[in-house]
Amino acid sequence: MVQYSDGQAMGNNNDWLNFEHLVKDKYKEALKPPSMYKVILNNDDYTPMEFVIDVLQKFFSYDIELSTPRYLRQS
C-alpha cells in the first residue's frame, strides 16, 4: 500500500485509473477549439478573376451568385 503526503492511501492496483481520469479532465478543460482564421485575398494584376471566384466557391462555400459580386465589390 502506498501512502501519500496528504494522508490518502492507495489500496489496490486499480486506484491509479482514477488518478489518470483526473489528469485527463484537467487537460480537457485547458483545451478549447481553435478560433476562426481570417483570410485575406490580395487584389493583384497576376491572379485571374476566375481563380479568385473558384477559391471563394471551393473553400468558402459561396455559390456563383455570391462569389462574383463579392469579388467585384473588393476590386
Image (tube, rainbow, N blue to C red):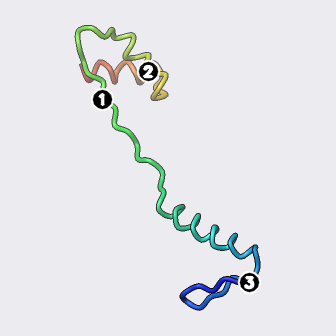
Instruction: Give the left or right position of residue 36, taking residue 13 as reference.
Output: left
Tag 1: amino acid:
Ile
> Which residue lies at the image location 49% right of the left edge and 28% below the top edge?
61
The answer to whether residue 29 is above or below residue 66 is below
For discs 2 and 1, the disc positioned in front in the rendered view: 1
Report the disc number at residue 40: 1
Which one is earlier in the sequence, the residue at label 2 or at label 1?
1
Q: Position of residue 60 (x, y in %)?
A: 45, 29
Q: Amino acid at mark 3?
A: Gly
Residues at badges 2 and 1 in contact (C-beta under 8 Å)? Answer: no
Q: Quadrant of residue 42?
A: top left
Residue 22, percent across and down? Answer: 60, 71
Seen in the picture, residue 11 relative to 37 is either above or below; the reply is below
Find out whether the residues at labels 3 and 2 contact each other: C-beta distance under 8 Å. no
Q: Which residue is mark 2?
A: 65
Q: Is residue 45 left or right of residue 39?
A: left
Q: Nearer the viewer, mark 1 or mark 3?
A: 3
Q: Mark 3 sits on what residue? A: 11
Can you tell which mark lies on residue 25? none
Q: Secondary structure at mark 2?
A: helix
Compare residues 63 and 52 and report the one nearer the observer.
52
Labels 3 and 2: the sequence-earlier one? 3
The quarter in which the N terminus is drawn is bottom right
- The image quarter in which residue 45 lies: top left
Which three-letter amino acid code belongs to the residue tagged 2?
A: Glu
Residue 24 to residue 69: above or below: below
Kindly report which numbered mark, 3 or 2, lies closer to the viewer in this rendering. 3
Q: Secondary structure at mark 3?
A: loop
- Alpha carbon of mark 2 to alpha carbon of mark 1: how far? 20 Å
Other residues around mark 3 within 10 Å, as few (<14) / some (14–19) / many (≥20): few
